[in-house]
Image: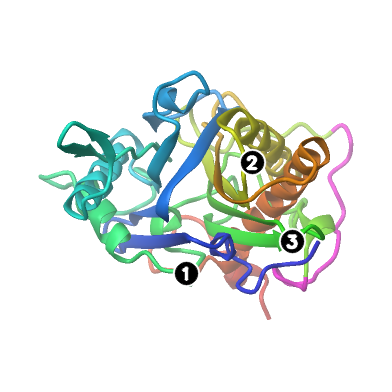
Amino acid sequence: MKPGRRNLITDVEGLLVGNAQDGDLRSGATVLVGARPFTAAVHVMGGAPGTRETDLLAPDRLVQEVDALVLSGGSAFGLDAASGVAEGLRAMGRGFAVGDMRVPIVPGAILFDLLNGGDKGWTENPYGRLGREALNDARPDFAIGSVGAGCGAMTGDLKGGLGSASAVLDSGVTVGALVAVNALGSVVMGEGPQFWAAPWEMASEFGGLGPGTAPAPGHEPTPAKRMGEATTIAIVATDAALTQAQAQRMAVAAHDGMARAIVPSHTPLDGDLVFAVATGARPLADPLAGSFALGHAAACCLARAIARAVHAATPMPGDLQPAWRARFSR
């Protein structure tokens, strides 16, 4: 296993990512869109999720593919970002065909960033506009850190952000992850600067600092956020051909990566969620061994993407938390 050329989820051929953010708002939206509709599934582990159209991702539902996935700030207001993306896709003539109508299928998930110091006194919900701008920005190469859905994200002790990573398996299959980190837990060991995800780091992608010293086994962390204020929302993707049921198992396995990179994770106060995407370009030669490898790779990529999100976050005037690079970078 090795990183893809970009070390981004867009190393899965046919996928594009767009970001839009508003510095005054301290929030934004991120969209993953494909050259064509793709198989998608979801698995929720956190106790406080905020989602749109996730019920239709179950394997027994009528629609088996979606047009895009959206990650957004803004709490419940941010769900409107998916509406902006759907409007943009409809204008492109994309969507599920119903008679002579096209209905874009755009599931989404949100994180809470309403108390991060940004100006939230809008008179008109800005997230539909941000979703449309993110769609218009979709490209193979995109920025990570304090952009898109990660623009105003925070963790228990440091600024959060948007992260991504990829891996190419020995079989030639590509796996990638995209994540907005707004966790209750910490991404660094103790006081830092080392990351919990260090054992899975590739090519010094988040500093090459190696493992740090973990807190004592009896350490009992206390929540630094209140109910509903924390969430890590992610997408893992592959070019393998998967059914929705197989994609859901990949999403389940990917949650292991979240637990490796954030301590604690999956708490009652987080809305932790993972979407899984399969473009179907590469059949699995061995469905059993292939699914096993995909789950492991997805978890590793997600852990790396989480660390990269925090490592890449940039300081801004008025920040309520320090950026990793401001506190630790030389």
Q: Within the image, what quadrant is residue 250 found in?
A: top right
**Image quarter in which the C terminus is found:** bottom right
State which region is magenta: 203-218
Which element carries disc 3, helix, strand or loop? loop
User: What is the secondary structure assignment of the residue under circle 1?
Assistant: loop
Alpha carbons under labels 1 and 3: distance apart:
19 Å
Image location of residue 189, percent across then percent down: 77, 52
Kindly indicate the quadrant of the structure image that contains residue 326: bottom right
Q: Is residue 270 among the parts visible in the rendering?
A: no
Circle 1/circle 3 CB separation < 8 Å: no
Looking at the rendered image, the quarter that the N terminus falls into is: bottom right
CB contact under 8 Å: marks 2 and 3: no
| Dot placed on the residue nearer the N-terminal end, 2 or 3 | 3
Q: Residue at x 54, y 23 (%)?
A: 47
The residue beneath circle 3 is: 172
Instruction: Assess whether residue 292 is covered by the magenta stretch.
Output: no
Q: How many discs mark residues in the rendered view?
A: 3
Amino acid, disc 1: Pro
| Residue behind mark 1 | 140
In percent of width and height, residue 117 lies at 35, 52
183 vs 79, left or right, is right
* The residue positioned farthest toward the top in the image shown: 60
Q: Is residue 212 magenta?
A: yes
Nearer the N terminus, badge 2 or badge 1? 1
